[in-house]
Amino acid sequence: MVDKSIEKPLIVPFFIPFQGCPHRCVYCEQEKITNQPIRRLEKKEIVDVIERAFHSQSHKMRSEREIAFYGGTFTGLPYETMRELLGAVTPYIREGFVTSIRVSTRPDALDEEKLKFLKEYGVSTIELGAQSMSDEVLALTRRGHTGQDTIRAVQLLKKYHIRAGIQLMPGLPGDSEEIFLDSVQKVIELDVDMVRLYPAVVIRGTELARWYEEGKYHPLSLEDAVRICKKSCILLEGRRIPVIRIGLLSSPAFQEEGQIIAGPWHEAFGHLVRSTIYFDKIKPQLACEGEAARIRLRVPPREISLVRGFKNEGFYRLQASTGARIEEIIADPSLPSGQVKVERL
């Protein structure tokens, strides 16, 4: 079995939006999501970025250094293109500057021939854009593959000892909380190595945007998306499957007015989910309402941001829960993770 406790690598990303894809899914606008135009990625560009990364301090501090090709369907590219992209990286693998390569693809775009090819070039992690394990949701979203394709792809990756990641999208057409959590459970049963959660948002210019404007699609609210992703994280990480990303990156294109038409978009969505999980975890340790008028909290240093929440939302939620004024939050390195100390003043 692949070791899931492997050190978090330094990832140098390259984006190939929509390239290799057989068609565009109803929610897809990868150019805006990645803030990258559809264009050919040249070998010289890859080499230049890698060289700059090697001279950064963060590169020197990590023993695991990974090149990642995100967006599009990497294994849907012609072999000649894959060979050129991977070939730009392999000299750095031989020299020990890069330890591995990661690519993203569709579950139905893998076979044994391609996996043998990718392993020869040092690919050790493949993330699958599964989005859902429900065939009905996949059909409505026009993904072009089934849940069984995802199962087969993960089994192939395990056979070739390649780390398997799964990307899931709550809130797609035909989805519900029950259906999505069933997808999460099926992914847990596959014992994958990592998961990303990307709640569906409505981006201008997509088929989904047209459906929304016609009243045929109703996206998740922010509150519902946070709740579903919170439950999903607890289920996945309770089975030692790390959730490595929650919510889309805050692309500059998304900051332009009117690009996100509807849906649970938030610039710090992952932090909202994590702080909500943390609040539920520490709530039994807090003072009950009416026990004290003023309190001081001692918190593990790395968890202060989770206590405070996005723009201090967590701070105010704590005050509402305890009925007490929080005078101070102190970093206390003596406390273990997930434990807080309440001092009544």
Image: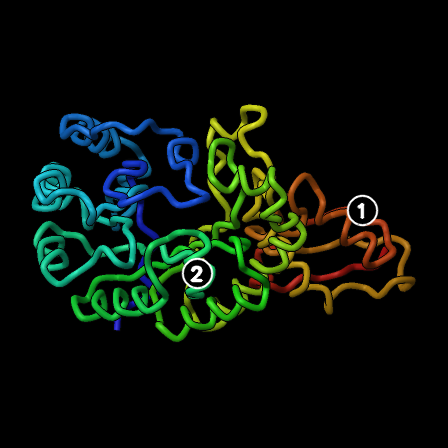
Does dot 1 land on a helix, a strand or a loop?
A: strand
Residue 75 left/right relative to 215: left
Contact, mark 2 vs mark 1 (Cβ under 8 Å): no
Relative height, residue 233 to residue 70 (above, below): below
Residue 344 left/right relative to 226: right
Badge 2 density bin: few <14, some 14–19, many ≥20, Cα 10 Å? many
Which of these two is toward me, 34 or 8?
34
Residue at position x 45%, y 51% in the image: 245
Q: Quadrant of the C terminus?
A: bottom right
Residue 61 visible: no
Residue 121, percent from left and from top: 10, 50
Q: Amino acid at mark 1?
A: Glu
Mark 1, residue position: 327
Relative height, residue 167 to residue 208 (above, below): below
Residue at position x 22%, y 34% in the image: 54
Q: Quadrant of the N terminus?
A: bottom left
Residue 175 visible: yes
Residue 68, percent from left and from top: 26, 44
Which circle's residue, 2 or 1, is located before the other in the chain? 2
Q: Which mark is residue 132?
A: 2
